[in-house]
Structures are given as C-alpha cells and as structure tokens.
Image (tube, rainbow, N blue to C red):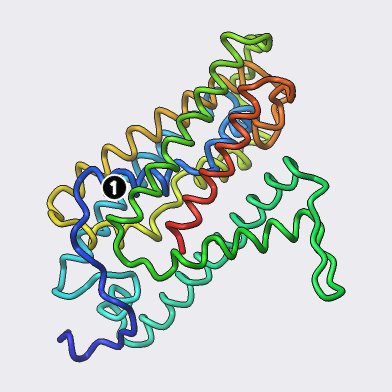
Amino acid sequence: MRKDERVSHEVPMSRNSSYGQAVMNGLNVLCGVGILSTPYAAKEGGWLGLGILFIYGLLSFYTGILLRYCLDSESDLETYPDIGQAAFGTTGRIFVSIVLYLELYACCVEYIILESDNLSSLYPNAALSIGGFELDARHLFALLTTIAVLPTVWLRDLSLLSYISAGGVIASVLVVLSLFWIGLVDDVGIHSKGTTLNLSTLPVAIGLYGYCYSGHAVFPNIYTSMANPNQYPSALLTCFTICTLMYAGVAFMGYTMFGEATESQFTLNLPQDLVATKIAVWTTVSSTYSTLVMIT
C-alpha cells in the first residue's frame, strides 16, 4: 500500500521521545486508576486469582510487541486505523477507527466522572450559578476537568506529555506508599488472611485485572513517537514489570488490611482522619488527570 493510497486525516506524530520518556508515558497509561481496585479484585477472586493478573501481564506485553511487528510490516503504518486499512482496505480503516475512538471517548467519560467524584468528595459544597443554570459539585468539577484537559488535545509531541506522565507516575507511587504507610505504620494494621479462591465471583476479578492492562490504545503512539524505536520492547518490558509489581503489592496489602470489607476502591476503606489518606485521595485526583491527558 503506497502512502498516497492511504486515507488519513491525522497529524504526524513527532519522533523525538527518549527511552525514559516512553517509559513514563507507558507507566502513566498502565498504572492508572486500576490500581485502586486490585485489592477488591483480590477479594473477589481470592489469592489464587492473583495468578490471572500475571497471566494478563504476560499476554498484554506479548500483544504489545505484536503491535510493533504490525506497524513495521509496511512503511508508513503508525496507528490502528493504518493497520486496519493495510489489512482490510478503507472499510477496515473506518471500522477500526470507529472502535478505537469509541473506546477512547468512553475512557474520557469514565475518567471525567471519576475526577468529578473525587473532587466533589473533597469539596461537597462547591456550586456555581450561571445565567440561571445551577451546577452542583459533581457537574461543576466535571466541567472544570474537561476545560483543563482540552488544551492538551492539541499536543502531538509525546516527549512534552511525558512530563505530565511523570507527575502521574509519581502520584501513583504516592498512592501505593500511602496504603503501605497506613497498613504498617498507622493504626489499621494487617488483620485478614483472605480466601484462597472464590469461584462464584472470580469473573469480577478477571474483569478488574484485565482493566489494569488496558493501555494498548496508546501503544502505537508511544512506539511511533520514539527517537529510537528499537528500544520499544525494553521500554514496554520495564513498564509491565513495574506496573505488575505495583498491582500485586497493592492487591496483597489492601486485601490483608481490609479483608472481606474491601471496597471497590481501597481509598474508600482508608480512615478519613489520617494525613496519609488525604495524600492518597489528592494524588488519585492528579493521577487521574494525567492519564486522561494521555488518552485524549
């Protein structure tokens, strides 16, 4: 397929991201809000269910490498729509584009709602009245989040976005450290031995663990943005290794701390009067924003 035969309306991706910047972008996409639900997934699936997390990690890493081979199979392939057109022509490009952008749109809606929920829990009395329209805390923060993200839509240089990604990665690490601090230093402690296997709710755990590795929509952009694409496999391996260790650590610590009372997000279990809890909630807000920036 020649370049002039492609039907593309996309702005070319800048190719100047270093290895470290690619790792930051990859970590930011992978290690997002899914980390908050891993203790709940451990509760739903039991300890043996954690094996699913590692299986997903291996499969996701392998498919991430396969994406590279797809993009390298022909010259000028850079995105999922390009792959769709190379395989099935214009019809394939249109179909893949619809699926891809619907997924990204749904993710944006999800993250905006999550950001709105987190901020409205911190400032429940926030409100705004404009021209007779009343906005409560949830709708106000959803609007403000959307406005804050919009300028980043025009950024095509992932080397610049990597600095925002670094902030998101630091936020994720702080959330993990806050959980461990509360469990090991503050008054929560470790109380539960947990369940070996919960077959009745194992499908819930399968879905949650799968969500933890849902970053493939951005992998082609990360690959095509690298100044040295040959470093992509090692960058991807670094991302998956770090994220899997963080996911497993949070799942273990959260489930042993809260047992069968583990909520869908472990931040809901944390004692509200502790400083570490406030740090965890605020860093969740910043982590969600940085992930939202990447997927837009």
Q: Position of residue 72 (x, y in %)?
A: 16, 65
Q: Residue furthest bottom?
A: 5
Q: Quadrant of residue 14?
A: bottom left
Q: Is residue 276 above or below residue 190?
A: below
Name which residue lies at 82% across and 66% down. 129
Name which residue lies at 44% across and 64% down. 152
Drawn side of residue 257 relative to residue 181, left or right: right
Q: Is residue 41 above or below residue 132?
A: above
**Residue hosting label 1:** 62
Give the number of callouts: 1
Q: Is residue 113 above or below residue 177?
A: below
Q: Circle 1: is it few (<14), some (14-19), or many (20+) Cα within 10 Å?
A: some
Name which residue lies at 32% across and 33% down. 241
Q: Amino acid at mark 1?
A: Tyr
Q: Is residue 67 above or below residue 40?
A: below
Q: Position of residue 42 (x, y in %)?
A: 59, 28
Name which residue lies at 44% across and 29% down. 246
Drawn side of residue 118 relative to residue 80, left or right: right
Q: Position of residue 57 (x, y in %)?
A: 38, 39
For this rendering, which residue is in front, 207 or 284? 284
For this rendering, which residue is in front, 34 or 172? 172
Q: Residue furthest right?
A: 132
Q: What kind of element bears circle 1?
A: helix
Drawn side of residue 197 relative to residue 261, left or right: left
Q: Quadrant of residue 82?
A: bottom left
Drawn side of residue 140 relative to residue 4, left or right: right
Q: Position of residue 108 (x, y in %)?
A: 56, 61
Quarter that holds the N terminus: bottom left
